[in-house]
Image (tube, coloured by chain):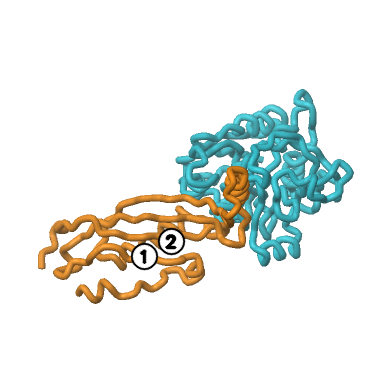
Chain colours: A orange, B cyan
Amino acid sequence: MACLLLSIPKPLFGEVSDARVSHSRIGAYPTFVTLSAVIQTYQARIYVTLRPSVLDPAGTAVQSGLKHLGYDNVEQVRIGKYIELKLSAADADSARSQLDQICYQLLANPVIESYRFELTEVSTSLGTGAVS
Amino acid sequence: MKFGVTVFPGSNCDRDVAMVLRDLLRQPTRMVWHEESDLSDLDVVVIPGGFSYGDYLRCGAIARFSPVMQATIEHAQQGKLVLGICNGFQVLTEAGLLPGALMRNRDLHFVCDRISLKVERTDLPWTQNYQSGEVITLPIAHGEGCYYADADTLKQLEDTDQVLFRYCTPEGEITDRSNPNGSLNNIAGICDRRGNVLGMMPHPERAADPLLGGTDGIKLFEGVLARAAAIVS
């Protein structure tokens, strides 16, 4: 089961797959998972940034400020959003699928923004009702 | 013709719109709380300006999921009229009723001013009381009014004449200097393919009462009524 959990997740939304830069894989996976009985809790760290083709006037202003401070070597300042959340899911793949939906539907506006996230398992608890 | 003005937590132009519709134009108008989901009695839904849900996350992002917006989407799909002003325009793009997005103004400032607009098309209820190419003056007040769409979407908007208002000089020239927020192609207002959904950053309701120093905006609302009159007669 553990190797199933470690399989590469498939993009859920083909049309936004270019928006998904990377999904870092952090944390160890349990080796005793039975999907029906165990629910994992995951910590997600989500980064929402403007698409490269979109101008970022705030980033440009910050870069200009840095230049005034003497940091002439700084380039391409881009400002984005960082969001943390916890979610429970049967396994990391389903957590990722759900996070893709969450980002696509609300956290990012695919017209102007792209996103990526990191997932960390934080605890394991027995699900209710199902015992195997 | 019955109007509904949606009210989200944080809307602040809802009463201005209602005052124009109810008191100046004498039209039946009701305020529609964001939790309502039945708009079947309404002919026109107006989404007013303001800061719905505090503009949290992105302007209009949370409002999009409210029950009243689900009902507004159905209303629009039936071909009925929907007008989004300022924050209402942002809500319409977030909801997917209009293409593109509204971003931080080019110079990062909140712009509160009176600007010149060119009316690009007059065959729709929204603009039929204007002359084609007419230059009008309306107030703007926004921090996120920079219209953006990818190149393909922008081309399609122009090819199908969906741009109704553009920022211009008082003489009607479309220039970079007359663009208050960096909007692509100086876009101030667009409609959907069918023309029944209009989103615009300028505030026509703030230029409707002569007491407030300008009446270029009232023609927009009168145009909507003229259409209703044409249908009845």
Q: Is residue B57 left or right of residue A31?
A: right
Q: Position of residue B169 (x, y in %)?
A: 84, 44
Name the side, left or right, on which B115 lies relative to B68: right
Q: Are the residues at dot 2 and dot 1 in contact (C-beta closer than 8 Å)? A: yes
Residue at left offset 45%, top offset 53%: A107
Whether marks 2 and 1 lie on the same chain: yes
Picture coordinates of residue B201, whole percent (x, y): 68, 43
Q: Quadrant of residue B206?
A: top right
Q: Nearer the viewer, residue A88 or A78?
A: A78
Q: Say which residue appears at 51% left-offset and 48% top-offset.
A: B61
Residue in view at x 43 percent, y 57 percent: A103
- Residue for point 10% across, 64% down: A131
In screen coordinates, is A25 left or right of A14? left
The foreground one among B62 and B115 is B115
Residue hosting label 1: A24
From what the image shows, is residue A30 above or below residue B115?
below
Q: Is residue B146 above or below residue A7?
A: above
Q: Callout 1 environment at 10 Å: few (<14), some (14 to 19), or many (20+)?
A: few
In the image shown, does A47 or B42 lie closer to the viewer? A47
Tag 2: amino acid: Arg
Q: Looking at the image, which residue sits at the far right?
A: B171
Give x and y (percent) for residue A1: 20, 74
Q: Is residue A20 visible?
A: yes
Please state which amino acid type lies under the numbered disc 1: Ser
Residue B43 visible at all: no
Which residue bears the numbered disc 2? A116
| Tag nearer the camera, 2 or 1 | 1
Quarter of the image with the N terminus of chain B is: top right
